[in-house]
């Protein structure tokens, strides 16, 4: 029989994101004439795909029981590399940018699985280190893309929906399928639920963790590549300092448990839309950007505190 604490915890997980979205939609529809328009919602999804793609990787890692706070700088590194390489060969730039993300994920995984470093600490250090690397390779300068084809790709729309949004939605389907129907997905949930039990049952724990870190790095690099295609430019300050924490908030708001073992792609998508809608609303109401930071901090604190209070009997 479920305890009161567990029932409350499940209610918070299931309905917090829905309630937040409903309140925001109602509030913004009354305070902005342009909010409930097709154009604004298409723009909302376009803005959401950057966080959305990264949140998929971060979400998978959190289900696995680990964190990655370096995704913002992996995204930035990828964007800057592909824009700088567009002066030489755009295809080579695309390959290098995606490989850089996978390598960053591999390095993070080695720090966590082999060196036994705390994942929060290790990836936070990686975030700061990558920030310095980006300034070194860019010379602290912004760059404009030199490939017309790459620029055109970033502006392509299918049925008036940006191709970048379509890519995000396809990735959502792929990751959801992976988590639910593949052995890798089941092992990811098992490790997040109880790593010791998963190890004793024969699951190759370190291998799964390493693959998920590389997947997270790849998705962050892909997000950076697509962002570069959309803007046709990149700067060393891209993604600093809030993007990694924003993406983490998207996943947590979407119901991914910080202790691991629980989380769904659909809920991650809703979390991303909620965070993007906050930014969208702040822009429409002409509020200063710090209101977004305040709102996200309060949301994250509420979820963490409620989970701490009501989850004692839930695990």
Image (cartoon, rainbow, N blue to C red):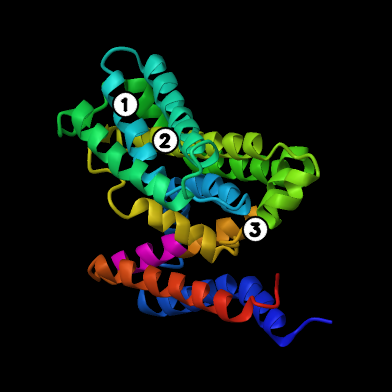
Residue 281 position by quadrant = bottom left
Residue in the image at 71% along x and 81% along y: 7
**Mark 2 nearby-residue class (10 Å; few <14, some 14–19, many ≥20):** many
Mark 3, mark 1: which one is toward the viewer? 3
Camera-side residue: 271 or 73? 73
Q: Where is mark 1, residue-wise?
A: 81
Q: Where is mark 2, residue-wise?
A: 226
For label 2, the SS is: helix
Q: Position of residue 64 (x, y in %)?
A: 62, 49
For label 3, the SS is: loop
**Mark 3 nearby-residue class (10 Å; few <14, some 14–19, many ≥20):** many
Query: Residues at badges 3 and 1 in contact (C-beta under 8 Å)?
Result: no
Q: Position of residue 87 (x, y in %)?
A: 26, 16
For label 1, the SS is: helix
Camera-side residue: 13 or 45? 13
Which residues fall within the magenta stretch? Answer: 275-283
Residue in the image at 57% along x and 62% along y: 254
Q: Earlier in the sequence, mark 1 or mark 2?
A: 1
User: Can residue 38 be seen in this snapshot?
Assistant: no
Residue in the image at 37% along x and 21% along y: 149
Q: Where is mark 3, residue-wise?
A: 263
């Amino acid at each position: 029989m479920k305890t009161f604490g567990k029932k409350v915890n499940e209610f918070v997980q299931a309905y917090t994101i829905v309630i937040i979205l409903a309140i925001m939609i109602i509030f913004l529809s009354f305070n902005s004439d342009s909010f409930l328009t097709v154009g604004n919602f298409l723009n909302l999804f376009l803005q959401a795909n950057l966080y959305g793609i990264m949140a998929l990787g971060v979400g998978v890692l959190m289900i696995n029981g680990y964190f990655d706070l370096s995704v913002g700088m992996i995204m930035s590194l990828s964007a800057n590399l592909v824009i700088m390489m567009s002066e030489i060969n755009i295809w080579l730039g695309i390959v290098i940018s995606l490989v850089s993300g996978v390598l960053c994920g591999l390095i993070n995984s080695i720090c966590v699985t082999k060196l036994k470093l705390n994942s929060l600490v290790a990836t936070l250090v990686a975030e700061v280190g990558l920030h310095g690397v980006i300034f070194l390779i860019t010379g602290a300068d912004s760059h404009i893309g030199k490939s017309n084809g790459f620029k055109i790709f970033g502006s392509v729309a299918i049925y008036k929906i940006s191709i970048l949004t379509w890519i995000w939605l396809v990735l959502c389907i792929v990751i959801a399928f992976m988590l639910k129907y593949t052995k890798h997905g089941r092992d990811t949930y098992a490790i997040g639920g109880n790593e010791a039990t998963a190890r004793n049952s024969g699951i190759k724990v370190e291998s799964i963790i390493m693959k998920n870190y590389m997947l997270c790095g790849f998705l962050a690099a892909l997000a950076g590549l697509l962002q570069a295609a959309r803007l046709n430019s990149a700067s060393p300050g891209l993604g600093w300092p809030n993007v990694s924490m924003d993406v983490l908030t998207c996943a947590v708001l979407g119901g991914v448990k910080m202790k691991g073992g629980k989380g769904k792609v659909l809920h991650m998508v809703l979390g991303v839309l909620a965070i993007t809608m906050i930014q969208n609303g702040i822009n429409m109401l002409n509020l200063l950007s710090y209101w977004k930071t305040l709102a996200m901090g309060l949301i994250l604190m509420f979820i963490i505190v409620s989970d701490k209070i009501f989850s004692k009997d839930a695990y």
